[in-house]
Amino acid sequence: MKRILIQLDTDPQPSTFDRVVAVDSDVDELFSYGGITIENAEPLVHGAMFTRGPKDLKSTAIFVGGSDVSAGESVLAQVQKTFFGPVRVSVMMDSNGSNTTAAAAVLCAQRHLDPAGCEAMVLGGTGPVGLRAAQILAGLGANVRLASRSVERAEQACATIRAQVEDAQLKPVATGNDAEIMAACSGAGLIIAAGAAGVQFLSAEQRSSLEALKVAIDLNAVPPVGLEGVDMMDTGKEVDGVICYGAIGVGGLKMRIHKAAVRRLFESNAQVLDTAAIYEIGREIGQ
């Protein structure tokens, strides 16, 4: 029985990145559809559900992607709503690489520190990757400071995570100027910068002045990077006494997690690979 992956992309053209990874993950057949919305997803899902017998449904799976993470989440919800009883297939959502990147970033940090009780700062915490990194860290027992230029937006993001993670320790912080950023980062042992491309949060001088900082992870590969002095290629490199990872340094593990997750889809027909599930896959394959 051939393994078929159905790519539902919310962008007009399905992501070539996700298609290449699917092929490299040993998918036999890849059906790619762009412009997917909650209104047009159902017939495609029905096609996955009703063409194979119950024992063979594990050989069909759905991947939800695209650049708009909110749209991807809506499509994921619609896909799950369409299933009924045992008539379903496994589905993975990784719009904009948000889940796999967040999982990889946290796992890189775990090579050097225990998140439980750690003071962790997530800069750009209301973005798709930052929000998910904060969710994973909160689930591991970290004291998470979730940052945004607007404290109101940070509070909304914290509320979203609290609805998913019981007893999450979260603090919304504003980082609209240098003084706010430095105050928010003071005492943090881990900083993950997950802001928009080209946004610098900390200069090298500011970063080096943070005495409690042990691990710094910058997920932006577009100059200027979010944490000055952290090179995009850094993979556990010590810089000014701090262990640093850049976007490409994290990217290797991200790719391993992405491929492992796609392969995992075909182990049964009842899996939903979201943020928490994808992190667990990353943890299982090794940091």
Image (tube, rainbow, N blue to C red):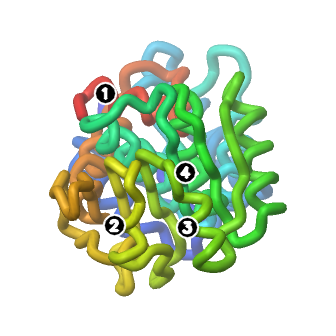
Q: What crowding class fits label 2: few (fewer than 14 Cα within 10 Å), some (14-19), or many (20 or more)?
A: some
In contact (CB < 8 Å): disc 1 and disc 3? no
Helix, strand or loop at label 2? It is helix
Give the number of the mark in front: 1 or 4: 4
Q: Where does the image place residue 287, in percent across and percent down from the top left? A: 24, 34
* Marking on residue 1: 1
Helix, strand or loop at label 1? It is loop
* Marking on residue 208: 2
Quarter holding the N terminus? top left
Q: Where does the image place residue 123, in percent across and percent down from the top left? A: 55, 62
Q: What crowding class fits label 4: few (fewer than 14 Cα within 10 Å), some (14-19), or many (20 or more)?
A: many
Give the number of the mark in front: 3 or 4: 3
Sequence order check: which comes first, mark 2 or mark 3?
3
Sequence order check: which comes first, mark 1 or mark 3?
1
Which amino acid type corresponds to the residue marked 1 in the rendered image?
Answer: Met
Can see residue 100? Answer: no
Q: What crowding class fits label 1: few (fewer than 14 Cα within 10 Å), some (14-19), or many (20 or more)?
A: few
Q: Where does the image place residue 44, in percent across and percent down from the top left? A: 62, 48
Which amino acid type corresponds to the residue marked 2 in the rendered image?
Answer: Ser
Residue nearest the viewer, comparing 44 with 268: 268
Q: Residue at 77%, 33% (x, y): give it.
A: 163
Q: Where does the image place residue 119, in percent across and percent down from the top left? A: 51, 41
Sequence order check: which comes first, mark 1 or mark 4?
1
In contact (CB < 8 Å): disc 2 and disc 4? no
In contact (CB < 8 Å): disc 2 and disc 3? no
Task: Give the residue number, with chain letter if any, for mark 3.
Answer: 182
Task: Give the residue number, with chain letter if any, for mark 4.
Answer: 64
Sequence order check: which comes first, mark 2 or mark 1?
1
Residue nearest the viewer, comparing 161 with 284: 161
